Image (cartoon, grey):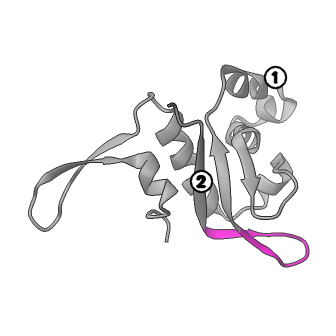
Amino acid sequence: MLQTEFEFTLPKGYVDQHGNLHRDGVMRLASAADEIAPLQDPRVQRNEAYLSIILLSRVIQKLGDLPDVNPSIVEKMFAADVSYLQELYEIINGNGHTQIGVTCPHCNASIVLDGASLFRESALGE
């Protein structure tokens, strides 16, 4: 069965206007519309860097107790968290494969890891 949603834990976490910390969330696979629609947004047309803000707000399904995740919330996230989410997005949507080849620094053995599992288990960013 194809996995379409991926749990994550932000390295820092989003702090809302009440001071509540939100770290755990869910990101879904992106659709073609998720990648095309933001290109029509005037904010993206003025500043291409804004594309990732809108794109992330479309695919993040849950973040802590927040009722929804919109571009304003992503704008206020710490840079480390946005970078983490961009990496997760690339891993789960990049080329359809979530496997990552790595070399053990201790024994130099080549290992293939499932990148999506690393995020699910919160092995990255903690």
Image quadrant in which you'd find residue 81: bottom right
Front: mark 1 or 2: 2
Q: Is residue 73 left or right of residue 52?
A: right
Residue at x-position 85% and y-position 52%: 72
Judge whether 74 appears above or below 16 on screen: above
Q: Nearer the viewer, residue 29 or 53?
A: 29
Residue at x-position 51% and y-position 31%: 2
Q: Is residue 9 left or right of residue 21?
A: left
Q: Residue 7: give its label.
A: 2
Q: Specify the segment rendered in magenta.
A: 11-22
Judge whether 32 appears above or below 75 on screen: above
Identify residue type, mark 1. Gln
Q: Are marks 1 and 2 in contact (CB under 8 Å)?
A: no
Measure how far apart labels 1 and 2 are at the Cα level.
Answer: 29 Å
Q: Residue furthest bottom?
A: 19
State how many labels appear.
2
Judge whether 92 appears above or below 77 on screen: above
**Mark 1 secondary-structure assignment:** helix
The x, y position of residue 106, in whole percent, is 13, 68
The x, y position of residue 8, in whole percent, is 58, 57
* Label 1 vs 2, first from the N-terminus: 2
Residue at x-position 82% and y-position 76%: 20
Q: Residue 40: give its label.
A: 1
Judge whether 5 appears above or below 35 on screen: below
The x, y position of residue 85, in whole percent, is 59, 51
**Mark 2 secondary-structure assignment:** strand
Q: Residues within 10 Å of mark 1 (few under 14, many from 20)?
A: few
